[in-house]
Image (cartoon, rainbow, N blue to C red):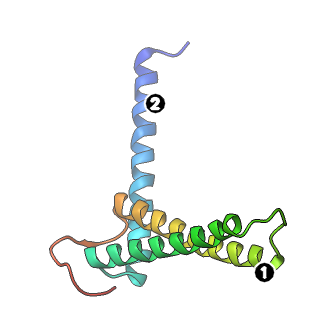
Amino acid sequence: MAEKGDDYQQLMDQKRFLGEIEQGIRFANREIIHKHIPTLRKDDILAFAVAVGRLRGRYLEAALKLGAGERGEAPDQSEINEIRARREAFDEARDGFEALRDAIEKGYVTVDTKGGGGGT
């Protein structure tokens, strides 16, 4: 039977190990991402958010057109293809934005909190 002290020490060793792994992951991600995005500014993030919003609007517009012209007939393949393309574009952009948000929250990206203008 293991002693309580042994269990506690094992738990502390696991926490220390996981902390070291997380630190290594953070360092690797920062280094890799920094090569692609040296500094990220508020304007860059807002411009990306606006682009995602536009894609969302285009996707919803195409989807709503199905109902506007509905006369009991199934939509034709070109309409379906247009909706699919717009949905895929929106999904990819939204997923990219969420990946960016996650990278910022985890400290993988250098964020310029003082500057507003400029590009990536």
Give x and y (percent) for residue 50.
39, 74
Q: Would you name the residue on which mark 2 appears?
A: 10
Residue 38 versus residue 46 in the image, above or below: below
Give x and y (percent) for residue 23.
38, 57
Look at 79% across and 65% down and name the residue there: 71
Badge 2: few (under 14), some or many (20 or more) residues near its Cα, within 10 Å? Answer: few
Residue 76 versus residue 107 in the image, above or below: below
Horizontally, residue 64 falls left or right of residue 100, namely: right
Horizontally, residue 27 falls left or right of residue 39, namely: right
Locate the N terminus and report the quarter of the image it occupies: top right
Badge 1: few (under 14), some or many (20 or more) residues near its Cα, within 10 Å? Answer: few
Disc 1 on helix, strand or loop?
helix
Residue 39: name its quadrant: bottom left
Residue 90 versus residue 11 in the image, above or below: below
- Closer-to-camera residue (49/115): 49
Look at 76% across and 73% down and name the residue there: 80
Residue 45: name its quadrant: bottom left
- Closer-to-camera residue (56/1): 56
Total labels drawn: 2
Question: Which residue lies most toward the front here?
Answer: 71
Disc 2 on helix, strand or loop?
helix
Q: Kindly report which numbered mark, 1 or 2, lies closer to the viewer in this rendering.
A: 1
Residue 113: name its quadrant: bottom left
C-alpha span from label 1 to label 2: 61 Å
Under mark 1, the amino acid is: Ser
Under mark 2, the amino acid is: Gln
Look at 36% across and 78% down and name the residue there: 47
Q: Which mark is residue 48?
A: none
- Closer-to-camera residue (69/21): 69
Q: Earlier in the sequence, mark 1 or mark 2?
A: 2
Q: Which mark is residue 78?
A: 1
